[in-house]
Image: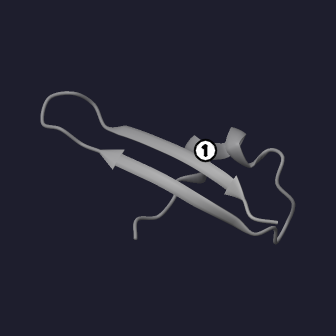
Amino acid sequence: MAPLLLHKAKPLFHNLKINQKVRIYSDYLQESNPPKTSAYFIEKLS
């Protein structure tokens, strides 16, 4: 499991409370010539 870089995903955490249960979907693509691509989606469970 790769670590989630919070500085990139900071706007996604704006409406969350401390200790709130969430599910985080992430995708990290790296190709030889184009730059790295990261995608995050956060689902609130409670």
Q: Residue at x 27, y 31 (%)?
A: 35
Quick check: 46 above or below 28?
below
Locate residue 30 relative to residue 25 in the image: left or right: left
Image location of residue 45, percent across then percent down: 75, 64
Quick check: 3 above or below 43?
below
Locate residue 1 relative to residue 21 in the image: left or right: left
Q: Residue at x 40, y 65 (%)?
A: 2
Q: Residue at x 75, y 69 (%)?
A: 21
What type is the residue that disc 1 sits on? Ala
Q: Residues within 10 Å of mark 1 (few under 14, many from 20)?
A: some
Image location of residue 26, percent across then percent down: 47, 52
Query: Where's the C terminus, which quadrant?
Result: bottom right
Image location of residue 23, percent across then percent down: 62, 63
Q: Which residue occupies the extreme right position in the image?
A: 17
Q: Which residue occupies the extreme top position in the image?
A: 34
Colour mode of the rendering: one colour
Residue at mark 1:
9
Image location of residue 3, percent across then percent down: 47, 64
Quick check: 3 above or below 14?
below
Locate residue 46 relative to residue 8 in the image: left or right: right
- Camera-nearest residue between 2 and 20: 20
Locate residue 30 relative to residue 37 in the image: left or right: left
Query: Where's the N terminus, which quadrant?
Result: bottom left
Q: SS class of the residue under badge 1?
A: helix
